[in-house]
Amino acid sequence: MNVDPEVVEQHFPDEATPAEAPEPTIAVPQFGLHDSKWSEEQWLGLLETLVETGVGTWKDITALVLGHLNPSQVGTSLASSVGFKRRYGKGNTMKIVMEWIYQQTGRCTDCGSRLELQADHIKGRESYDDPLDADFIENMILRCRRCNVVRRPSHEFGGITFLTAEAALMWIMLVIRPRTLLDFIRMCRLYGMTMSDIRMQEAWAMAHWLARAEPPAFGIENDAASFYDLILWPDSAITRIDADGLVPEGTTKIYSNISGGAVLGFVTLREDGRLKIHGQPVSFIPFSTYNLGSRTPQSLCIHYSPPVRDKGLPQKLSPLPPRSATLVCHAVRLSEQTFRLVSADGAMTQDLPPDASPLGRLIKTKMTAAGIGLTAIP
């Protein structure tokens, strides 16, 4: 349906009783998004594109590779450690360390890379009563920075992604080309990144820099000046596409020509029979227009929960409502409007607060899920 600012939009369910919600299933991030399947020709093509678009020069890229080939401070980091000094003595440590370095193959023992090599313990410090007892030359091996870092217990998804975080941030941005910061962060979470959002916000600076280049080399969505169609997927996920864009097969267009400044409201039914009201600005809703490899177009409909260390709770990816939920009704409102619940016969109404969160808040109401609708009011 087309949304006219002067027309109140509402939706009543087709059936009296919503169907059972499927069990939420969000898999642990796979091996990247689809970079792990790239050929050498694709990597070369990306490199050439970076140069052709002025992101870097051949000199820049070659100089960067040369710098990362240099095993800087691999020897001094070992020789200056307390454990090595204690075991070998201050005067002998560097000689022993350098002899060991020269005998290595110069490749990461796990992936074979020659870039960013570091000395790593074969048997970790945590395996010793005294951590310094782990510092002896026979217990050392060369690993690249990525393979070294992903072995740490703090990296819950360590080893299942293809690139280092700093490289993957740029690969996701320049290859998949997210249109919003929120979609960029969601892609990073699907890739398996576990660091704070601030790392992704900092990386997003590159999108702004490239957008201001002449000619512009990146496009950042201007939600305030744009209009979108909202799409409902079979698993109840809701995504957006450009207005009058191609509607994915098997989906339903539920709203057309929606302002980027509008808010989508919807009600979901919990397993205990209680209702929740959700409010998602259109600018918050993921796009479903990206090439995510083997992932489904609505894969960005996820919510990331950071770990709660003091309670022993791990980080997790959960379905973004209404994905994998029982969707009861929905409506769209403008900034000056609020939502109202309406019974099917119109006999009962209930105004709702305007600050409903994207993840939802419980509603205290005498109305049941059967036959209620949601409408926008001035």
Image (tube, helix red, strand yellow):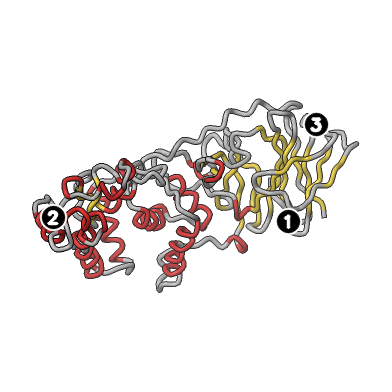
In the image, 281 versus 14, the foreground residue is 281
Q: Position of residue 161 (x, y in %)?
A: 35, 45
Q: Which residue is mark 2?
A: 101
Report which quarter residue 37 is drawn in: top left
Kindly report the distance in space between the C-alpha atoms of the residues bearing marks 3 and 2.
72 Å
Q: Residues within 10 Å of mark 1 (few under 14, many from 20)?
A: many
The three-letter code of the residue at mark 3 reads Thr
Residue 304 shows in this picture = no
Give the structural element (helix, strand or loop) at label 3: loop
Residue 375: assigned label: none
Report which quarter residue 343 is drawn in: top right
Give the total of numbered labels: 3
Q: Earlier in the sequence, mark 1 or mark 2?
A: 2
Kindly report the distance in space between the C-alpha atoms of the residues bearing marks 1 and 2.
65 Å
Which of label 1 and label 3 is nearer to you? Answer: 3
Which of label 3 and label 2 is nearer to you? Answer: 2
Q: Position of residue 117 (x, y in %)?
A: 22, 55
> Horizontally, is 328 left or right of 169 in the view?
right
Q: Residue furthest bottom?
A: 214
The three-letter code of the residue at mark 2 reads Ile
Q: Residues within 10 Å of mark 2 (few under 14, many from 20)?
A: some
Please tell me which residue is depicted at 78% across the width and 52% down the height of the picture: 338
Q: Earlier in the sequence, mark 1 or mark 3?
A: 1
Which quadrant is the C terminus positioned in?
Answer: bottom right
Q: Which residue is mark 3?
A: 368
Residue 334: assigned label: 1
Q: Residue furthest right?
A: 347
